[in-house]
Image: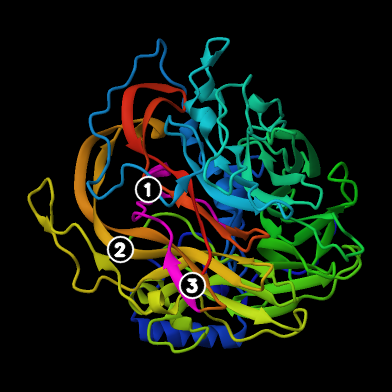
Amino acid sequence: MELWNVPPFHKSQAYIRKGRPNHEKSLKRITIAIALILSLATLSSGILTHATSKTYDTTTLAGKLASVNDTPGLYFSLSDLLQEEADTSDLASPPSPVTPITPTFVLSSPLDGNSVQPPAVTVNQDLNGAPQNEPAIAVDPNNPNRIVVGSNDYVTRTWSCTINGTPCSELGDAYSGTYYSNDGGATWCCIATDPNNLATLIPGIEHLTGGQYDAGGDPAMAFDTQGNVYFAGLGFDRTQAPNTVAVNKGTFDSNGNLHWGPPTFIGQTTSKSILNDKEWIAVDTHATSHFRDRIYVSWTRFIFSAQTGRYIQSPIFVAYSKNGGATFSTPQLVGGPVIYDQGSRVLVGPDGTVYVFWEGSTKLATFNSIWMVKSTDGGKNWSPPVAIADVVDILNPANTAFRVNSFPATDITPSGDLYVAWNSEALNTANSYTINPVCAFFISGVASVRANCHAGAVYSKSTDGGGSWTTPVLIFPALDASNRTPVGYPATNPDNTILNAPSNTGRVETFFPSVATAPNGRVYMSAYAADTLSPWQTCKTPATPTAVGRINCLELGNYIHNARLEYAVADLTTNLSQIVSTHPINSRHGFGGGFIGDYTSIAVGSDNVFHAVWTDTNNKQTVTWWFGFEFVPTTVNMQDIATAKGSF
């Protein structure tokens, strides 16, 4: 295992607390102006404050997460999936004998949809309220009608079967779901119903699919030129150390049915000091490349002290396969000395050059940056890292509760032009891309960011193979310049007070961008837009344990402001954009509103038609079994994967 011998501390770390900011202490009750002066003075002086002497049990995901989140100077965390899975409050066992639960209240809103409406289409096929989120998509380069989508899939948490008297839904967890279409995305298959009918659930990773791990997910998809499709994901235990990156190969039979083979594990470990996270996959599908059909996988390797459990570094690693995913090369660290990293994307250019992008920093950087390395010899040797642009990591959009990141998304045109997109906090009054300390929560505090800044999805372009990059610009400038639309006000609270629409609804925020290029040179980008503000009634007293309380509310609370989302697609070639979701998305549904995934996705087929996928919550479904607990049939809105296609 290769380690770079540099401490993971930033100059600004005296003002930084990783993870969710400490709202009470961020400004220490002084004015924003004074805080900025002091913060900037500290940055220029290069003062370093050493981490505490606290130790961590990195055998568990929770211990690893705490170690990362407590590290001064880190602006990212584990993947959203691993953060959700680190919380073991959903592992409580149901009572025996089982008595179906009748909810007192189920949180909902008259503004919620009843179904995903055309022309958008629901991808996943379960009807029992299982959450799916964080979609990835791939289109067969030889057949534009053949599409595969992957997601984090909790379908096993709603199965009605039992194993030796234990409900399958108690034994299930986050798994890797896939769904395919042979008609250009009009219809989709399939649904897994029990361990004997996995359909297109990825096999061989988690326990109920014949694997060795508690859970899996974090999907990435890619086709080769032979019509095979590859799924890259994670496998991990929640309270023990084992974890891995895994790649499964899928093939289509003569009837167009998708069949997944067993996994090939990469970087598999039982060490409590290593955590593999946030993988991505790409295949060289270019006819003139010397490395045609070579498979590349990139990921983050979090490394912790074996003695104290403290975070040491998190470099990006890459491995490749020359035999259709049967075996992979020895994992190789890329990008050193930029080794405090997360959220990589790997990409192959038309000449076979391989690019890896990620968010990260060197040891004394004030801000994170988007970085890039490349290989021209099939992944054997890699260039030094190139910094594309600095990033001000975003807060979750105002009036939401879900976790976010500023990881990059990328693609390349047939002519070799590179595009990379990410999120950054932007000053509301800015006319161009700037890195302003006012928008950095770790410098000016959360209140300053909320008052003066907003999250924006931006992109940069390179026409010389990544040697130089344009100044970042907004993907959706018109949306970015708009304020959120209030809908559904006023609302009367249980205590008879009134929640009115705020006089300042706040700026529209765009985030979780994706990038896809077409054979005709068109460049498509997509992202969520938090463009609507509405009342949402909270639960004052949720039932216990946590899993039950996510459906059964014992006592309703007051209303709060809630930002709803749309999903937008832009064509950079024509400067046109459109909303492709068909009803505002309520992110409060599913996981208490805290987890909608780390990304969205878009892909383009050989017919130049784009296919966008996102997490939607407008389907109403009926829950009976839920995380081991039985309910009377209960109607809920839950997370699903939706898709839309088109061209400009």
Q: Nearer the viewer, residue 107 or 43?
A: 107
- Tag 2: amino acid: Thr
Q: Nearer the viewer, mark 3 or mark 2?
A: 2
Callout 3 touching callout 2 (CB < 8 Å):
no
Which comes before the other along the chain, label 1 or label 3?
1
Q: Which residue is mark 2?
A: 532
Q: Residue at x 74, y 43 (%)?
A: 244
- Can the viewer see residue 83? no
Image coordinates of residue 219 in percent, x first then y, are: 63, 47
Image coordinates of residue 393 in percent, x first then y, are: 52, 70
Q: Nearer the viewer, residue 303 or 97?
A: 97
Q: Which residues are magenta?
A: 575-601
- Tag 3: amino acid: Phe
Q: Residues within 10 Å of mark 1 (few under 14, many from 20)?
A: some
Left or right, 85 with reference to 591: right
Q: Which residue is mark 1?
A: 117
Q: Nearer the viewer, mark 1 or mark 3?
A: 1
Q: Nearer the viewer, mark 1 or mark 2?
A: 1
